[in-house]
Amino acid sequence: MFKQSRCTIRRFKCITGMAFFIAFMIFSDCFAWTLTDKSGRQINFSKPFTRIVSLYGAHTENLYYLGLENHIIGVSINDTFPAQVEKKPRFSYHDDPEKFLAAMPDLVLIRPMIDHGYPKLINRLEKSGITVISLQPSNINEMYDYWIKLGILTGKKQEAEKLVRVFSEKIHYIKALTHGIHPKKKVYFEAIHTRMKTFTPGAIQIFALETAGGINVASDAKASRRTNIAIYGKEQILAKASQIDVFLAQKGVMNSVSIEQIKKEPGFSVIKAIKNNQIYLIDEDIVSRPVPRLYKGIAAIGMLLYPDIFTSEQLEKEK
């Protein structure tokens, strides 16, 4: 797998994930890494990256959690969190490659959508010696791996491991709160109202819902492409109208919906949750991004479903 170097090998460790592989060798006087990203490109590097352009909000947010503000030299035009990101130069996959080259990054972090949609930009950056890495987790286990990968890329592996550990502890706390709930509320979780779409089982959003004690009534949703979003037609929704205790919809760039719009949707008046006025909106940023802030989304869902159990005082202790 690796050619023997003049350095003495002291340790070898492999970390595998659903979509990538990292091999790690530590030597007495040098080290080397090999990483295969989400799109299959293999990256070899011998030191942490320190001049990073992030073209995905989750990458940016996680880099801040890892304490890397000073190593971020550019962010996506859509980034809004944390507040400090407003001071960073803005980049887009629509930009001329020369803009990236002028900033002299040693790493550009993207996600598969950019890789597939803008190959000319990516090829130009790589031909100019800039490392491009595509990462985006599809489920909770991949999310943990993804945090570790970001830590390894930036020399913050211990910090990344702490993120995983602390988040996992919080999840155990939430599961303990919801363990004895019976019956649990059945929820339809809307992704995009205008297209009648929900989330596929295993998606991070469904993990958030189920961790908070909700039951996903659209567990039969199937994605038509490589995405965590699935078409779930009105007929499918109405077929389960009597089962839906709560109608939950993410709200944000992907789904600019209102409660009134949901109420007035033709045919929706027969849905149990609509009849009982159990319709809620939740910020998509806290339920759709693979970041530690996902805990906030889980807690928010819990307080909507079970306000007597998820008290703000209890959750404040866990922050």
Image: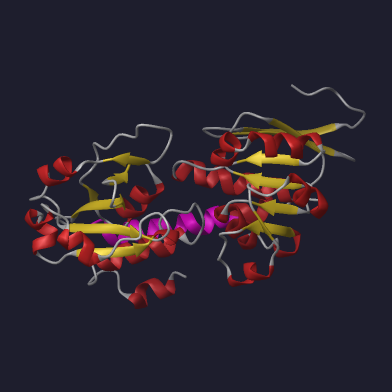
Q: Which residues are magenta?
A: 162-180
| Residue 170 lies within the magenta run | yes
Locate residue 50 relative to residue 230 in the image: left or right: right
Instruction: Say which residue appears at 67% left-offset and 40% top-offset.
Output: 133
Percent x, y for residue 207? 36, 49
The picture places residue 53, in percent across and down from the top left corner, at 70, 53
Question: Any magenta on residue 174?
Answer: yes
Tell which of 259 and 19 is nearer to you: 259
Measuring from the top left, give residue 185's x and y in whole percent.
Answer: 18, 56
Q: Residue at x 14, y 41 (%)?
A: 235
Residue 156 appears anywhere in the view: no
Rendered residue at 45%/58% (across/down): 294
For the N terminus, the quadrant is: top right
Q: Which residue appears at 70% of the width and 58% of the height?
A: 74
Question: 133 or 206, which lies in front?
Answer: 133
> How many circles with numbers are drawn on the protein?
0
Q: Is residue 189 left or right of residue 288?
A: left
Query: Taking the image as drawn, is residue 314 in sight?
Result: yes
* 42 shown above or below 239: above
Q: Nearer the viewer, residue 98 or 108?
A: 98
Residue 239, compared with residue 307, is above or below; it is: above
Query: In this image, 35 relative to 117: left or right?
Result: right
